[in-house]
Amino acid sequence: IKYPELVAAQAMEETGWGSIQSAKNNFLGLKASLSEVARGESERKLTTEFRGKGEQVEEADFKTFNNIRAMMMQYKKQWNDDFGQYKGLVNANSIQEAIKMLQTEDYATNPDYDKNVLGIIDRAIREGWF
């Protein structure tokens, strides 16, 4: 993973500083595909999304994982590396550019996602987390 500090900050943002997982072993808010839902590899939960009408609560199917390693491998495959027509974060020249790529590809719909995640990274640096 090109920017591990970004992934750590995303996990903090997606879980409310570790207070809740999106689904079993899912600390990154990774959504399930239709086939994963059909196989029972997901949990349906309420989530807050921003889709042109401001903040909205909606139901979404989040992918369940057997362990954290499996979650990280899915993130690496789907977001870090080139995936289908999506250019992965390996192509980003900075953390800021990587976050913008995630927003462009609908990983996060919150218009303040970049500010929130960068704020977590800044705090981590100030407090010596990494």
Image (cartoon, rainbow, N blue to C red):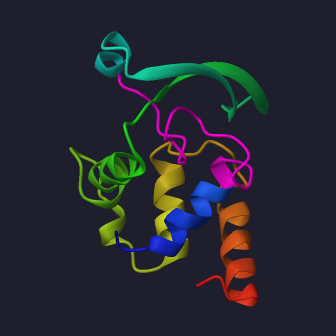
Residue 84 shown left or right of residue 59 in the figure: left
In this view, the residue farthest toward the top is: 38
- Give the main secondary structure of the magenta stretch: loop
Going 66% across and 58% down the picture, which residue do you hit? 12
Going 47% across and 39% down the picture, which residue do you hit? 30
Going 76% across and 26% down the picture, which residue do you hit? 56
Give the quadrant of residue 1: bottom left
Give the quadrant of residue 90: bottom left
Placement of 91 over or under 62, stated as above or below: below
Where in the figure is residue 87, as x and y percent of width and height?
A: 29, 57
Give the quadrant of residue 64: top left
Q: Is residue 72 magenta?
A: no
Quadrant occupied by the C terminus: bottom right
Where in the figure is residue 8, as x and y percent of width and height?
A: 55, 65
Where in the figure is residue 2, as x and y percent of width and height?
A: 36, 74
In this view, the residue farthest toward the front is: 67
Q: Which residues are magenta?
A: 13-33
